[in-house]
Image (cartoon, rainbow, N blue to C red):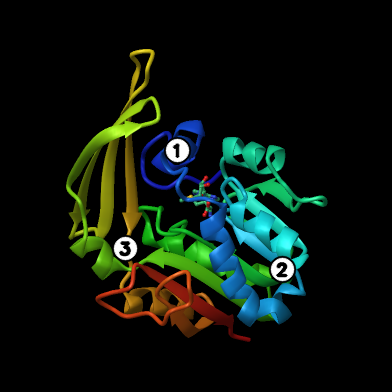
Amino acid sequence: MQKSGHHDHEWFEEWFDDTYLALYRHRNTEEARQLVRLLATRFSKEAANGVVDLACGAGRHSWTMTEEFGWRVVGLDLSPVMLNRARDHCPCPACPQFVRGDLRMLPFRANQFGLAVNLFTSFGYFEDEDENLTALHEMRRILLDSGTLIIDLMNPEHAIDTLVPIDKGFVGQLEVEQHRTFDRSAQRLKKRITIHYPNGQTRDVLESVRLFSPDEIESLLNAAGFSVIDKFGEYDGSQFKVGESQRMILVAGAKR
Ligand SMILES: C[S@@+](CC[C@H](N)C(=O)[O-])C[C@H]1O[C@@H](n2cnc3c(N)ncnc32)[C@H](O)[C@@H]1O
């Protein structure tokens, strides 16, 4: 597997496990359903040609796309823990296929899907900007020429304006402390999470995610063979507003 930086393990190779799922359990199927229903109002034609859920996590969007709309869905993720959860807890009679892979080197043939989705801040993890671009090139490669990519990022302005520097509390039995900073020179939102387990063990995780301005992400998408067609600001489909929206959900059409 390709690596960026000089670390043996990147934070995103290790963090997405049972503890992550416990901390983010409020990010549930209900939220996923809202976004998928929005996609269904606009992109069912593309979806009919096959959907790939890139960085699908524990499968909440893949499940809804399959169960509610009957789309043919493949979910891809790097984390075996998330993939096992996606397979084991799938509520659908015929479940999506879940495969392990890396966004930088997708294990799919060219021109295979009508719709690719990358949801809930699953992009911008690589320290090396070229690798973020490589991932977008890969997304373009596997899409049909008539295909569409949906990429769901934090709205940078909103994320910076509402940043909570420290919070502490319990999530179930886990005592969790989170320190957040915005590294302006790297344009990265960094979150140090310290987790105290009931058995006395402690774990430290450093999340680091690149925030992209609307112009930056648009030019990366252009460079990878996409053009931005639309931007939503919330999962209910509201239009993107620079200073206000929580999310920046880009609809990018494949360029021929
Ligand atoms: C914030 S979670 C979002 C998961 C899912 N989209 C959701 O909304 O529940 C980010 C996901 O990206 C996956 N991921 C991180 N780096 C990846 C990579 N290089 N290739 C594929 N998946 C990756 C993680 O394992 C994790 O499941």
Task: Tell me residue 138's x, y (percent).
Answer: 59, 65
Whether residue 109 appears in this view of the structure is yes
Q: Which residue is under mark 3?
A: 211
Residue tagged 1: 20
CB of mark 1 near ligand 1 (< 8 Å): yes
Classify the position of the C terminus by image quarter: bottom right
Q: Is mark 2 within 8 Å of ligand 1?
A: no
Cα distance in 3D space between marks 1 and 3: 21 Å
Q: Is residue 108 visible?
A: no
Q: CA distance from mark 2 to mark 3?
A: 29 Å
Q: Are marks 2 and 3 in contact (CB under 8 Å)?
A: no
Q: Nearer the viewer, residue 218 or 57?
A: 57
Eye-nearest disc, 2 or 3: 3
User: Between marks 2 and 1, how big is the CA–CA gap?
Assistant: 32 Å
From the image, tell me which residue sits under label 2.
Answer: 110
The amino acid sitting under disc 1 is Tyr
